[in-house]
């Protein structure tokens, strides 16, 4: 443990160390092992530190078989084995804020409602805990957030202590520890006692703030998304920017934004409905034009029409003209769409007809004896397909 400087002092920004070895792992990634390190390796839900060793960037840190490996962007080129090391402090302190904030929020849910934390993830953007409950109300979330921020404002000390398994009974642990030796407790007196190997600030006040952002059900648990410390300010900046843009776009004040958006959505629904009605009227007019001279066989080649429009047109024609046949083709670059339909008084089989056409265009489709459709490659022109269909009718 003496070699793990991050346990002695989580606030170390830089240190000196001796290179014990420099090798590549089984995947070919280069790493060094030092006689001591302040670089925290990935573990316990907390991501690894980054920074520099001599003139090389530390891009990953992992503990493998009892040794802490510092993965570098390139091998070290140094004359001696002693090197200077620097921690990316902004990243480290962010992790300290988030991890301590997670302890506080988890303890708040546990104390208020008995909801145990059964999962924890700290990403570069998102921070989540999974609570052992199948439901969470807005009131419960607000109360837990309020208690968590109260503990932060009280600036309680955050202590760490190494204990043996036998000594654990002296503490009111929030959950059972997984390890049986080298047990490290993180303690917020009279509030939270928890086994943890992560880095934390010296007092709750350094967490600054906790804000619950959202939650959702994950199997039998509830997953809480939240932010702590400087991430709260960044989230506020992002949301404030978006809100400011919306106030300008919608010409509405912040407090009236919800109603402005509701009105906008209602207007969109009405416009969409009116547009659909207009399209339907145009299709009906087009169907009448296509079958205007009481033709028994209505054929046409379209460009860039959707198969849904062709289907509607065909149904409109055969609905009004029960003695008609409809053969429609739409071309769209290298693709073709074909729709066949018949009125009630016709005896031809549309499924059989489409089955004769589709192999000619490497197509797929189907239907029934009254209505069939399919699509394929433009190996024939639209006019050639219509001619083939008319030939098959004879």
Image (cartoon, rainbow, N blue to C red):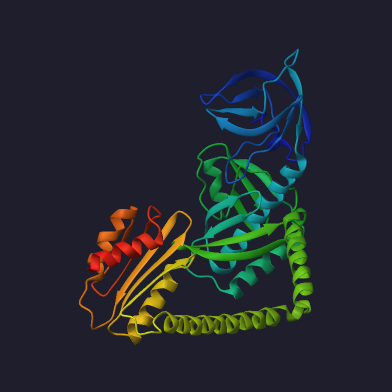
Q: Quadrant of the C terminus?
A: bottom left
**Is 218 in front, or is 202?**
218
Which of the 4 image quarters holds residue 229?
bottom right
> Can you name the residue that lies furthest to the top here?
79
**Is 2 in front, or is 54?**
54
Q: Can the viewer see residue 352? A: yes
Q: Residue at x 49, y 85 (%)?
A: 281
Q: Does residue 391 appear to the left or right of 33 in the view shown? A: left
On screen, 67 above or below 202?
above
On screen, 92 above or below 55?
below
Image coordinates for residue 118, horizontal then vertical, percent: 51, 55
Which of the 4 image quarters holds residue 250?
bottom right
> Can you name the residue that lies furthest to the bottom here?
320
Q: Does residue 232 appear to the left or right of 121 in the view shown? A: right
Q: Does residue 84 appear to the left or right of 268 in the view shown? A: right
> Can you name the residue that lies furthest to the left here?
347
Q: Quadrant of the N terminus?
A: top right
Image coordinates for residue 262, horizontal then vertical, percent: 65, 81
Image coordinates for residue 58, horizontal then vertical, percent: 69, 31
Q: How many marks?
A: 0
Image coordinates for residue 178, horizontal then vertical, percent: 50, 44
Q: Residue at x 71, y 30 (%)?
A: 57
Q: Residue at x 63, y 29 (%)?
A: 71
Q: Can the viewer see residue 190? A: no
On screen, 19 above or below 180?
above
On screen, 11 above or below 26?
below
């Amino acid at each position: 443990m003496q070699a793990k400087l991050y346990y002695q002092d989580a606030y170390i920004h830089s240190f000196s160390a001796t290179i014990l070895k420099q090798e590549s792992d089984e995947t070919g990634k280069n790493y060094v092992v030092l006689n001591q390190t302040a670089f925290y390796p990935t573990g316990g839900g907390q991501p690894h530190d980054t920074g520099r060793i001599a003139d090389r960037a530390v891009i990953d840190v992992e503990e493998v078989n009892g040794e802490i490996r510092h993965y570098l962007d390139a091998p070290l080129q140094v004359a001696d084995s002693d090197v200077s090391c620097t921690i990316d402090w902004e990243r480290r302190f962010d992790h300290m804020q988030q991890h301590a904030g997670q302890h506080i929020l988890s303890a708040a849910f546990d104390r208020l409602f008995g909801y145990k934390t059964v999962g924890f993830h700290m990403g570069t953007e998102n921070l989540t805990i999974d609570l052992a409950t199948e439901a969470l109300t807005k009131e419960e979330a607000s109360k837990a957030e309020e208690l968590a921020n109260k503990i932060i404002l009280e600036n309680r000390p955050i202590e760490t202590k190494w204990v043996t398994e036998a000594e654990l009974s002296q503490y009111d642990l929030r959950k059972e520890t997984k390890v049986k030796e080298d047990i490290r407790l993180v303690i917020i007196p009279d509030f939270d006692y928890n086994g943890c190997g992560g880095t934390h600030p010296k007092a709750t006040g350094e967490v600054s703030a906790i804000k619950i952002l959202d939650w959702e059900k994950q199997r039998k648990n509830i997953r809480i998304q939240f932010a702590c410390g400087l991430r709260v300010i960044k989230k506020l900046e992002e949301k404030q920017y978006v809100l400011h843009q919306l106030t300008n776009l919608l010409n509405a004040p912040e407090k009236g934004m919800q109603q402005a958006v509701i009105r906008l959505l209602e207007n969109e629904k009405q416009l969409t409905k009116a547009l659909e009605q207009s399209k339907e009227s145009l299709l009906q007019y087009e169907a009448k034009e296509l079958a205007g001279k009481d033709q028994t066989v209505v054929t046409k080649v379209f460009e860039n029409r959707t198969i849904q429009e062709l289907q509607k047109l065909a149904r409109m024609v055969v609905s009004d003209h029960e003695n008609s046949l409809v053969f429609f083709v739409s071309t769209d670059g290298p693709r073709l769409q074909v729709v066949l339909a018949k009125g009630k008084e016709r005896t031809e089989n549309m499924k059989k007809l489409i089955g004769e056409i589709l192999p000619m265009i490497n197509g797929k489709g189907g239907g029934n004896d009254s209505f069939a459709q399919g699509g394929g490659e433009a190996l024939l022109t639209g006019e050639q397909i219509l001619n083939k269909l008319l030939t098959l009718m004879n």
